[in-house]
Image (cartoon, coloured by chain):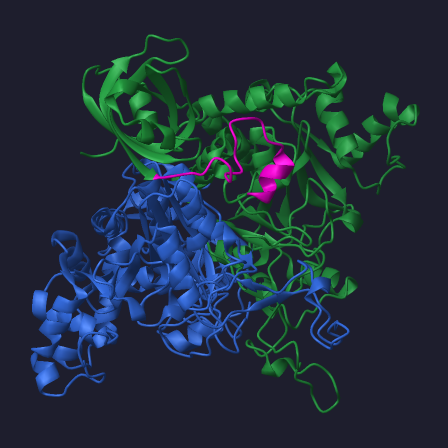
Chain colours: A green, B blue
């Protein structure tokens, strides 16, 4: 008899038929006549209730049905008499697939702290919260591929190991096969990278963008979706050493096309979550409320589903960085000295507090800022005619601030080269990037979305370590 | 006016309407009255023919329309008079987006060797062959996600940086932030990994399987799709240092369920390619024929589309390793001493030549071999009652031999522990893997598919460096 998943059974109304369900026991309760087993197999936030007539089973078997044990049940699908669920299964046979010693099992049927669950990340998939996050994460992954596929974008696997340090996006991880007990040296006493695996110094990628551009300037529209790395020693709720990025790059797109795509894309993802993950979102919304119940009203987050709809239902406001600076300079928190990082005028780097002010207080809509000062943005961004700004864009969301950063890319060979020289970037090593501006260069644009940032937004979780299965952070590479 | 993609225009029959196309010039030919420009934007293996009445354009503009240049054309969609294409566009305006100096551009309108194109991997997307491979690769990526999504599997991002060396799957790349000029040492003179980023020695993952199992033993059915790494110094057409793997893991699956899934999955992927990439496959088939035209008949590959249908249309033969050994011992090539690696009996490791003999000569069908000797398989495979085999399976395809390797996993805590001890694996470090067998263990199975292996099979390319955009091999981490 083939197993049916819990999610399917919960929607089934063909009462009286025999079904087989397999899963892990969340709880067993009851009395000496009847037992109720809450069974979960990862397919739904909801458990299936198994009703066991105690007289039909060995006492020793019933005792082994403990929290965390795995069982296979054959039984009759029935309309549930109790509240809280529509269907239940009257057990005819129960088989123990795997025991679970209650004294040793770290997951008890009670609330565990997220910190504790992080330490047992190999088991936390078995909790309601992490089951929900795993399902939502999958839905978002699939939605990313679906969105771009339907638009004719091609997914490009850009390299993880690279020899280039072009982005200067922060500290990088070295990748090496050299014996660290005995690093090979040249006659001059320097590290002899010619003896390393790739014959040169190599690192883990910080972004697939530059390679993505190479593909876009032949295939028109591409996207990357892969792991990226930062060796920053930041132990915060917002930083991971290893995280996943989505980076679309599009030939023939100017900054407006880029903004249109970013808005359409983010709305598509959130809509997809609302339509396909409603039960999990509802659970996560309640989890967040519960977590924040002791906070003051003004410190509470926007309700999760309301927050997603806030983005989906509003047109994103588009304005320039300079306009935003004016708004911020005239704002109450600025005048009252309430910003932790004071705005001093053009050139100020915006922090989450400023971004959130614009979104949550001033416009009450998602915001796209454009035309940032050249000095605070990357070398590859298209220079404007004013000589001081670049065609950059940041998409700002409530609660988290920047969720997307992008730009039109500089397609002019001479301007790009000049900028690289000004920043002392290794132009010989990056001949391949420059080549795309020498041979059939076209206007093009792209952006990056940090996938775990999106996951924080969609799930309402507060710590980025909780939205990726096995987080990598300073001093932590467990599992 | 919005740009239309070449792929869409080629299917359009609304003659007379005005369209805008942007792309890269493949060739321009013609006479002093009329020029024909073959334009490609990556959306199709076929170029769009642009017809330019020379008298309507500046001579200087026409001269700049060279191979590799990028142009934007506004013109009238017309039924093509010439052969080879249904539609063409009569140019009204032509704008040069990016020039391309013909003397410096490495890609000329002639056949380049694959070796040469590997050296200019940043530009090879602009060739017919690599355009086709990129589109097919995308289609296969999407098909993987679609297949598993529709079955209720969850995609799990397993970690890239790991501290475990459990698989023993070969040489690994070290990941470190230690200063290689000045490796920190302990008082005893050993490398002081406590000062490394993660506080211990870390590597790039060789497989996501073990972490995938953790997720499967809560979510039921999961799959990974991510980069994996081998620091093997193998400079062959079959090895990459960085490659992508797909690894499904399923709770409640025995070896038969595992085989069913592997067969359904591979057939789904090939069917998807046949249905969605027919023009690219036709091109790649012709490319392969052309490349092999000087070979002897018996050395030629099976025709590409025929080969894909050979897999899709046949039931995979399932037999045990021991049965396969008997067949091989009784085979002509064995008796005539034609195998490069002679089969000596139970315990012999099968090579591609043996696998191909079984598939191509003996059964003339794809083959799944099961129940391999324990001694030649990994520690986590389920031990059979005979005490000498494990519930492993390898799926064998024509031409490439093994395309999938998998097994039922050992769910018995004591047997698994015993095996790990016998192989001297670090049981303390792998407590998390063992925990899943202590707490609610269930029968489960999984397999791995090397994505570039699949790509070799689907595209008919001969060198694995040509089916990934930017290959990483010994002494090569360019781009």
Q: Residue furthest bottom?
A: A187
Q: Is residue B423 left or right of residue A54?
A: right
Q: Give the image location of residue B151, x and y in percent.
A: 30, 37
Q: Give the image location of residue A38, x and y in percent.
A: 39, 23
Identified at 62% across, 19% down, the residue is: A289
Is B137 inside the magenta-drawn segment?
A: no
Q: Give the image location of residue A68, x and y in percent.
A: 43, 34
**In the picture shown, does residue B36 fall above or below A180?**
above
Residue stretch in magenta: A98-120
Identified at 56% across, 55% down, the residue is: A208
Q: Is residue B240 visible?
A: yes
Q: Give the image location of residue A158, x and y in percent.
A: 51, 58
Q: Residue furthest right?
A: A336
Q: Is residue A389 left or right of residue A315?
A: right
Residue closest to the eye, A134 or A244: A134
Identified at 65% across, 23% down, the residue is: A291
* Number of numbered callouts drawn: 0
**In the picture shown, does residue A274 fall above or below A449?**
above
Is A106 inside the magenta-drawn segment?
A: yes
Q: Is residue B27 visible?
A: no
User: Can you say which quadrant of the picture contains the C terminus of chain B?
Assistant: bottom right
Q: Quadrant of residue B55?
A: bottom left
**In the picture shown, does residue A59 fall above or below A306?**
below
Q: Is residue B287 left or right of residue A396?
A: left
**In the picture shown, does residue A184 fall above or below A84?**
below
Residue closest to the eye, A336 or A173: A173
């Amino acid at each position: 008899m083939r197993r049916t998943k819990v999610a399917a059974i919960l929607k089934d109304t063909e009462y009286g038929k025999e079904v087989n369900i397999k899963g892990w026991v969340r709880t067993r309760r009851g009395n000496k006549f009847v037992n109720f087993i809450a069974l979960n197999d990862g397919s739904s936030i909801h458990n299936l209730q198994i009703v066991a007539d105690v007289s039909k089973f060995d006492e020793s078997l019933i005792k082994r049905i403990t929290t965390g044990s795995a069982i296979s049940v054959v039984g009759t699908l029935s309309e549930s008499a109790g509240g809280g669920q529509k269907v239940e299964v009257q057990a005819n046979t129960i088989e123990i697939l795997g025991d679970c010693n209650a004294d040793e099992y770290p997951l008890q049927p009670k609330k565990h702290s997220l910190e504790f669950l992080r330490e047992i990340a190999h088991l936390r998939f078995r909790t309601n919260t992490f089951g929900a996050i795993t399902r939502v994460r999958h839905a978002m992954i699939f939605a990313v591929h679906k969105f771009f596929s339907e638009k004719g974008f091609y997914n490009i696997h850009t390299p993880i190991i690279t020899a280039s340090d072009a982005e200067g996006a922060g500290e990088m991880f070295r990748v090496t096969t050299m014996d660290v007990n005995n690093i090979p040296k040249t006659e001059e006493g320097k590290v002899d990278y010619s003896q390393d695996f790739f014959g040169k110094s190599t690192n883990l990628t910080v972004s697939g963008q530059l390679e993505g551009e190479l593909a876009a300037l032949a295939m028109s529209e591409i996207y990357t979706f892969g792991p990226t790395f930062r060796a920053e020693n930041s132990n915060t709720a917002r930083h991971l050493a290893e995280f996943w990025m989505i980076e679309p790059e599009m030939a023939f797109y100017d900054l407006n096309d880029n903004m249109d795509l970013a808005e359409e894309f983010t709305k598509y993802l959130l809509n997809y979550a609302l339509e396909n993950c409603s039960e999990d979102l509802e659970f996560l919304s309640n989890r967040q409320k519960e977590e924040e119940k002791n906070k003051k009203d003004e410190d509470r987050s926007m309700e999760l589903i309301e927050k997603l709809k806030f983005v989906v239902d509003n047109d994103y406001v588009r304005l320039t960085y300079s306009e935003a600076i004016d708004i911020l300079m005239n704002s109450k928190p600025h005048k009252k000295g309430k910003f932790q990082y004071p705005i001093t005028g053009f050139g100020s780097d915006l922090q989450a507090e400023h971004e959130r002010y614009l979104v949550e207080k001033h416009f009450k809509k998602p915001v796209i800022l454009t035309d940032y000062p050249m000095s605070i943005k990357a070398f590859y961004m298209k220079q404007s005619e004013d000589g001081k700004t670049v065609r950059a864009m940041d998409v700002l969301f409530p609660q988290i601030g920047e969720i997307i950063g992008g730009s039109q890319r500089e397609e002019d060979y001479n301007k790009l080269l000049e900028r690289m020289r000004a920043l002392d970037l290794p132009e010989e090593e990056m001949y391949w990037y420059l080549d795309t501006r020498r041979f059939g260069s076209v206007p093009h644009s792209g952006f990056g979305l940090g996938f775990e940032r999106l996951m924080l937004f969609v799930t309402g979780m507060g710590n980025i370590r909780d939205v990726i299965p096995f987080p990598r952070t300073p001093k932590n590479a467990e599992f």
